[in-house]
Every structure is written in C-alpha cells, then in structure tokens.
Amino acid sequence: MDGPVQVVVLLQRLDLNRESHLVIEDGALVPGDKTLAKDAVVEIRSVISGGAA
Amino acid sequence: MKCQVCRGPAVIDVRRHNANFCQEHFLRLCRDQTKKAIDQFAMLEPDDRVLVAVSGGKDSLAVWDILRELGWEADGFYIGLGIGDYSKESQGYAERFAEERGLTLIIDDLLRDHGFDVPHGSRAAKRAPCSACGLSKRHLFDAAAKRGGYDAIVTGHNLDDEAAVLMGNVLHWQTDYLGRQAPHLPAANGFPKKIKPLVRLTERDTAAYCLLRGIDYLVDECPMAAGNKHLSYKDALNKIEVDSPGAKHAFFFGFLDRAVERFAPEEGQTGDVVISPCDRCGAPSSNDVCAFCRLAERATSAVPIELGRTRRSSNRSKSESHP
C-alpha cells in the first residue's frame, strides 16, 4: 500500500468486508480508525466459519 | 477512538451498538451479552451442569470460556470427524485449551467408535458432508449428555449463524424449520436441553474475544464447508450490515419477537409423531431405527465395487480385438 493508511480504508481497498475481518498488528487488535504506518506488517483475519449443521 | 465506558484507548468498534470499547470493557460486553441471552431465553439454572460442544474454533472455545467466567460448571465434548488434517488440528486446539485451564474434555471419534468418518460416510450415504456431519454431531452430543448426566448441551452458534439459517429458511419458506428456530430448545421426548448462549454476539465479536483473551483457536475453515449456501447467506448479510449496522440483530431478534410463534407447531400437531427408543442404540427416534444408525449402517456397509466398462473402454476393447 502507498503511504500510511487507515484500517477501514485498507479493508476497502482490498475489497474486504469490515464486518467479517479483524486486523491484527504485532498480535494486537487494531481498531478501524487507526492509521497504519507505511511499513506496517498486519494480519487480516477472516472471522467467518461454519457449515450448516 | 475512545472506549465509550472508560474513555481509554479503544481496541474495537462495535457498529451495531454505535460504540467503541477498550479490551477490558469489550470482554465485559461479551460476557454481559451472553448472560443477557441466557436470562432472556431462560436457558440455564445456576446449578445446571453443562456440556459444551467444542470444535477447536473460536465460537465453541469462547462460549466455554465465558460460561466458566459466569460461574457455570462446564465440561467440553469434542468429536473426531475424520476430516484429514483439519480434524487433527482442531482436536489439538480443543485439547490445549482444556489442558491449559484444567478443564475436562471428553473425546469421541466417529471412525474409532462408529466405524466411519464424515468424508466417507457422507459419500456412502449420498448426503452432503455438512448434513452427515450435523446429523452425527447432534446424535453424539445427545448421547454424551445423557451418558454424563448433563442438564444442557451448549453450542457456539452466534448471531451470524442464526441470521444465516433464518435467511435460508425464509428464502425457501421452510415453515417447519422456522417454527423450531429458537436459541433454547427445552428437553423433550428424551432429548436433552440445547442452548445457544452466543446469539447476541457476532462472529467478529467471538473472534475478537478469543484474541483479547489469549485463546488460541483454529482459524482455518472446514475444507468440506467451502461453497455451501450457509456461507453465501452470511456474506450477503454482512454486505447489508456494512450499510445498515444492526441489520442482522434486527432480522433475527425481530423474527423471535414477532414471527416465530406464527410458525410454531399447533397444539396436537406434534402428538402425531411417536418418539420411541431406536431399536439399535436406544436414542429417541421417530422411526424404528434412528437416522444416525441408518447413516452408520450405510456408511459402514459401503465396500469398493469394480466399475463397469465405460463406452470408451468398450470401444478400445473392440478395436483391440478387431484390428
């Protein structure tokens, strides 16, 4: 990504739904309004699971 | 972003509550919402012994953790489904969670105890994998609860799960299923009580809860669930939720408040179905042999067969014998 970017904007750019993903930086949950540094390394974790059982 | 309770730095936004929370107050929110669901639907008595159906995923580990935090005596029950590495990994997560907290985890294994696993059983019985899996789990949960004298079976179904099931039932007007879609199914006809205390929490909430509580869970999705309709309903609902926070909650709880009674079986309607012990396993059933025993019979009696000749191999044989 070019330049610092807010978490919600990052998810939008990646076409990921903010209701079904968490963003994690250094093992910590990152809120939607946080601005990530240009060189930040984050995990974007899908939270959707399950069959229809 | 500040926590709406203490004004400290927030770690998560919960848009359906129009609020942000720090770690401490988000964890409290999850516990409070679970307790609220338990009270709202009269799920548990204070001295109930509960058996938590544990998969190693976020929802089942979260509900086990929360119930213990709320003071209930809760043991875990894990079923090995034989879905390759996925099952081995998920069992590891369930075992580590229990060991680290000194909790009791009971383990059943479909292949070891019943002679089949989900991939082979579903093929042999010509059932969708999620259908064979769900049927097996429900049967084994019931049996384990009865064996251990538990008062209730707890599952980790959350708001997303219930809203997605509701959407599927409405789209196909499955009115018989609509009448039974409640977070608390009381004990009846030999079946134990079943409850879903996480119905006020979303999947995002339970994933965040685990992360903030240091609960290590299996993130990967079941490989056999890929592409099922349930997941596409969840996706559709989350697209609506982005533009309309609280839509999933309004959809499901509005149904419970205003519509579920309209689909409930009329008095006397259920009396037509006679429930009696299965001839083979003794579980309550509306047939002489219960659905699980029939599945097990088909799954274990399936033997490899030699395929007949295809048109191509027949033609090749002809051309070989008549050059």
Image: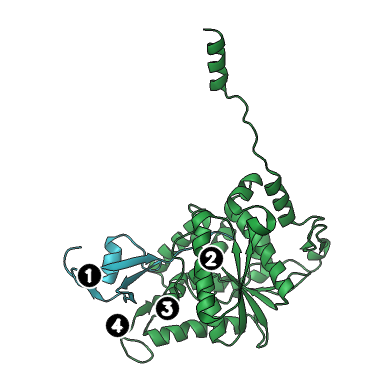
Chain colours: A cyan, B green
Please tell me whether mark 2 sits on a helix, a strand or a loop.
helix
Q: Position of residue B35 (x, y in %)?
A: 56, 84
Which amino acid type is shown beneath numbered disc 2? Gln
Residue mark closest to the camera, 3 vs 1: 3
Which amino acid type is shown beneath numbered disc 3? Gly
State if disc 4 and disc 1 touch (CB < 8 Å).
Answer: no
State if disc 1 and disc 3 touch (CB < 8 Å).
Answer: no
* Residue identifier under label 4: B1
Kindly identify which chain the residue marked by label 1 belongs to.
A
Kindly identify which chain the residue marked by label 3 belongs to.
B
Q: Quadrant of the N terminus of chain B?
A: bottom left
Earlier in the chain: of badge 3 and badge 2, it is: 2
Please tell me whether mark 1 sits on a helix, a strand or a loop.
loop
* Res. B124 visible in picture: yes
Which amino acid type is shown beneath numbered disc 1? Ala
Residue mark closest to the camera, 2 vs 1: 2
* Res. B135 visible in picture: no
* Residue identifier under label 3: B214
Give the quadrant of residue B198. bottom right
Kindly identify which chain the residue marked by label 4 belongs to.
B
Left or right: B6 with respect to B151? left
